[in-house]
Image (spheres, rainbow, N blue to C red):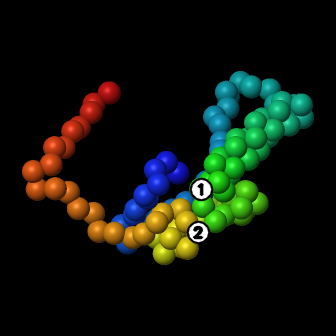
Amino acid sequence: MAGNTRLACRGSTFMFHGVGFDSNPAERLEEKNLREKLDVVTADHRRIASVIAGRTSLTINNCMSLFKQQSTRGADWAVQKGIIGSIADFTYPANGNFYTFFG
């Protein structure tokens, strides 16, 4: 959600997926541990939803619902919700520099 001008190509898709974590195979899960993990996931969802809600027309509750649905939405929907400002074709200047970073 960075930047004041956010663009996407017509074929772009947007998916709100929930926060998750990998579990240690030998980990013993009891109710207390499960509640703690759920609290962490829920807190992360709220933090992310707050950022999105602050930069779009979506509410925190809208975002929380989208995290659970995990459905894919199109570029037109993203414009309507203020996730992007507009749909534009990808362009790159003919003499522009292109950098590739390997890590």
- Write the residue at 48% across / 75% down: 76
Q: Quadrant of residue 77?
A: bottom right
Nearer to the camera, 8 or 68: 8
Q: Is residue 51 left or right of residue 80?
A: right
- For disc 1, the marked residue is 55
Q: Could you say which disc has been placed on residue 1 in the image? A: none
As helix, strand or loop, the secondary structure at mark 2 comes to loop
Q: How many marks?
A: 2
Identity of the residue furthest to the front in this view: 4
Residue 58 percent across, percent down from the top left? 66, 64
Q: Position of residue 9 (x, y in %)?
A: 36, 67
Residue 10 vertical placement versus 93 (above, below): below
**For residue 42, what is the image quadrant?**
top right
User: In the image, what residue occupies the spot 23% across and 37% down?
Assistant: 100
Work out which residue is located at the far left of the displayed protein and give it.
Answer: 95
Q: Secondary structure at mark 1?
A: helix
**What is the crowding at mark 2: few (fewer than 14 residues within 10 Å), some, or many (at least 20)?**
some
**Residue 87, image x, y percentages:** 39, 70
Marks 1/2 in contact by CB < 8 Å: the verdict is no
Any mark on residue 81, and which? 2
- In this view, the residue in front, 30 or 56, is 56
Q: Is residue 49 above or below residue 23?
A: below
Q: Measure how far apart labels 1 and 2 are at the Cα level.
A: 10 Å
In terms of depth relative to the viewer, which is nearer, 62 or 95?
A: 95
Crowd rating for badge 1 (residues with CA inside 10 Å; few <14, some 14–19, many 20+): some
Q: Amino acid at mark 1?
A: Arg
Residue 102 in which image quadrant: top left
Is residue 31 among the parts visible in the rendering?
Answer: yes
At x 49%, y 48%, the residue is 2
Q: Position of residue 83 (x, y in %)?
A: 53, 62
Q: Residue at x 19, y 43 (%)?
A: 98
User: Identity of the amino acid at label 2?
Assistant: Lys
